[in-house]
Image: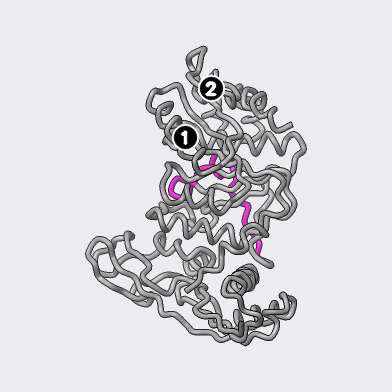
Amino acid sequence: MHEWALAEAVIASAAETARQQKMSVVEEIVLNIGELQSIDAEMFASLVKNQLTQAEPLLQDAEVRVVRGEAAFECQACKKEFSEQDAKVSEEEREAIHFVPEMAHVYMRCPACGSPDFSIVRGRGVFIQEITGQP
Amino acid sequence: MIDPRSSVIEKRLAGVKRIVAVTGWKGGIGKSSIASVLALLLAHKGHRAALLDLDFTGASDHIILGINDAHYTEETGLNPPLAHGITFMSMSFFSQGRAVPLRGSDVSQAALELLAVTQWGEQDFLVVDMPPGIGDASLDMVRWIKRAELLAVTTPAVLSVETLKRSLALFERLNVPLLGIIENLSTAAHSPFVSHAKFLGSIQRDPSLEAATGHPEQILRTRFAEELGKVAAVFD
């Protein structure tokens, strides 16, 4: 599953951030999983936890907590704000969006005016929301 | 919020010996043809060659090379398919032949996603068909793909030449190494860049390339491929 690659990115990024913030040990990594990418949040948290066991020592005992981020869009043409549910997509289209969330612009339309020219305001994909630890 | 994806790009490209970013900063100059046929020539010479089409809004490398049925597989990331000897990744795999209406920042985001999850494996060359222009996406690409060497494409047209001059100066300031300059669609004997230290050569306009589009074996027999092959000797 391609989520493995994103989990690896989370580990690498968390290590970079911890070093920048001069942490000696990371206690918790909070992940924000955006709705648009349709990643199973619990499964992704497990992937990250499994990879943490192989990570460098300052990360190995970190807890992983997941926050789900609701997706929201704003039409550039008519300024309507809408949700993922408002813009109906098929399962096949959802899979393309799963791999590359910007494919939303290919398959989704503003429910008010039909424009594909919208911005993804929030809930795009995987982010590290917070890292806490000890100096 | 921290976007973790750029942290893993170098690791994804660790098995790639050389990264050639084919760019030209002007539309209609044959950038995608150069990138696609260069990858084809490198593969034909026995190199492990990969091609990444980052020209998302006008993706055409799959059309040039006739890559119709290949598809990525999913393991610890996305494994690009091998097509005509080229390991190939493109947004065309996800857009199902539809237009891809992305603003500049969205192009960057989509490219970052592909760079973060594509498992290239061991490659001698990765040819990157760069986003057109010098906007967000081009600037982000040279920031994220740190080992990229620019292969700049121009034509004899004054607008193309002037754009290239300005763009080369910009990318020099960004410390992006220039591999060379190719003049495509050449009609004159002397390119304005012929005295440039990195000028690699000219490729004549070749009408047979259009007929060969989608047929790699035919492409390899065109004058375009023959002349690009001479220019590409720089890779040997």
Residue B169 is marked as: 1
- Asked if the residue under mark 1 is in contact with the one under mark 2, i.e. CB atoms within 8 Å, the reply is no
Q: Label 2 crowding class (10 Å Cα cut-off): few <14, some 14-19, many 20+?
A: some
Of label 2 and label 1, which has the lower sequence position?
1
* Residue range highlighted in magenta: B55-74
Q: Position of residue A40 (x, y in %)?
A: 55, 80
B186 to B5, vertically: above or below = above
Magenta stretch: residue B183 in it?
no
Q: Label 1 crowding class (10 Å Cα cut-off): few <14, some 14-19, many 20+?
A: few
- Nearest to the observer: residue A24 or residue B236: A24
Chain identity of mark 2: B
Report whether mark 2 lies on the same chain as mark 1: yes
Question: Can residue A2 be seen in this snapshot?
Answer: no
Tag 2 residue: B206
Residue ID at (59%, 39%) = B177
Residue ID at (32%, 63%) = A118
Does residue A115 appear left or right of residue B42 in this picture? left
Q: Position of residue B231 (x, y in %)?
A: 64, 25
- Nearest to the observer: residue B172 or residue B123: B172
